[in-house]
Amino acid sequence: MAHSEKIIVGMSGGVDSSVAALLLKRAGFEVVGLFMKNWEDDDDGEYCSTRQDLIDCAAVADVIGIELEAVNFAAEYKERVFRAFLAEYQAGRTPNPDVLCNAEIKFRAFLDHALALGAGRIATGHYAGVREVRERGNRGRYELLKAADKSKDQSYFLHRLSQAQLASAVFPLAQLQKTEVRKIAKEAGLPVHAKKDSTGICFIGERPFREFLNRYLPHEPGAIRTPEGRAIGEHVGLAFYTIGQRKGIGIGGVRDGGAQGEAWYVAGKDMQKNELLVVSGHEHPLLQRDSLRAADLSWVSGSAPEAAAYAAKTRYRQADAPCRISFLERDLCEFRFDQPQWAVTPGQSAVLYQGEVCLGGGMIQ
């Protein structure tokens, strides 16, 4: 090709972003890899894999035959993602930093950087799709779609992207199954073809979560109570628990008053009294909610959908649940579900779908 568009691929050192870069290179684009360093407080420790990831990225870029550059967004990350993350935990909610990181770092700081380098668009290894819908007489509008691999679909984490961000985004893995991605990587001789997927929150990595939060948040112990008001233990600080949590509450042996042999689950937090509410049994009514309110709304199309019947996810890796939405205020939306939803968690995202199309969503209040 004489003239080819320049696309900058966000590369993490994992198999997904590596194959995304490979596919674009094969399609004839001018591809540059960009490795983002978003965290540097203690990244020489045993849990943070940044250095190894960068080495892996360089090895992959070498095999594909593309340039690789590294860029440090640690300051932006701290300011736009980590501060919000801590503030949410302190308020007793359970935030989802991946959602913020995509909106603020990968598709904002990274996108700005890429455009300054003369790229037309950016690409990532996310499992999601983007489709341009042309309307008569208008420039197209962009839709965010679920990936073909439903078990890997990441549209949930991308639901805050805007029209401008989607117009500049390429998702080369949209139509691929994860197994195919690994196969492509192996056949192309990419050294990361068998590398295991990273799990958990990017800046925490594999380290124990509570130990990490301990460094940043004050913890004030308080009572653990049942719905009847009986105190059955002491919590280490409300920030360290999430709705629906079963392990690590620290009251395993307390049986009487709970249903026979049933596990305890976190069902709520009273921030005023500094008390943790626990219930006995997975199916306890206090763990079921048939409606929720979401605020801090963000709609992919740029305007709110009609109040109508849709489907929604209240957490990642959950089947779409049929629901209706209605707007209480401009930035407050009520989701009413056909079936009660389990462990709806304040701070997580409620994301709305119409079939394959991700419409956007908001933060559960």
Image (cartoon, helix red, strand yellow):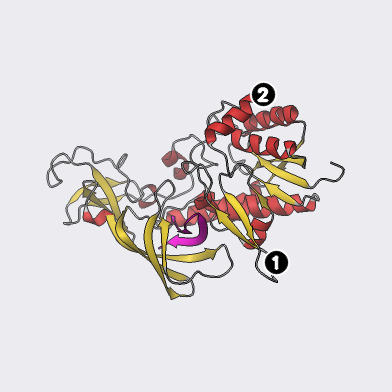
Q: Which residue is denoted by mark 2 in the rendering?
A: 189
Apparent side of residue 144 relative to residue 55 in the rendered image (left or right): left
Judge left or right: residue 317 versus residue 136: left
Mark 2 or mark 1, whichever is nearer to me:
1
- Residue at point 64% right, 35% down? 19
Query: Does the segment drawn in magenta span residue 1?
Result: no
What span is in magenta?
A: 347-365
Q: Residue at the spot x=57%, y=62% of the render?
A: 300
Residue 146 percent coordinates (x, y): 52, 50
Q: Determine if residue 275 is in view.
A: no
Q: Quadrant of residue 346?
A: bottom left
Q: Is residue 34 above or below residue 218?
A: above
Percent x, y for residue 355? 47, 56
Q: Nearer the viewer, residue 270 or 264?
A: 264
Q: Which residue is mark 1?
A: 139
Q: Is residue 286 among the parts visible in the rendering? A: yes
Q: Is residue 154 above or below residue 55?
A: below
What amino acid type should be assigned to the residue bearing mark 2? Gly
Q: Is residue 352 magenta?
A: yes
Outermost residue on the bottom side: it is 329
Toward the front, the furthest residue is 136
Tag 1 or tag 2, which sits nearer the N-term?
1
How far apart, in angstroms, are the residues tagged by discs 2 and 1? 41 Å
Magenta-colored segment: predominant secondary structure: strand
Instruction: Tell me which corner region of the image, top left, top right, bottom left or bottom right, holds residue 332.
Output: bottom left
Counting other residues with Cα less than 10 Å from the Cα at mark 1, is it few (<14), some (14-19), or many (20 or more)? few
Quadrant placement of the C terminus:
bottom left
What residue lies at 20% left-to-right and 52% top-to-bottom? Answer: 226
In this view of the protein, which residue sits in the foreground, 78 or 33?
33
Find residue 16 and report its horizontal and vertical position in percent.
Answer: 60, 36
Element type at marker 2?
A: loop
Mark 1 belongs to which amino acid? Arg
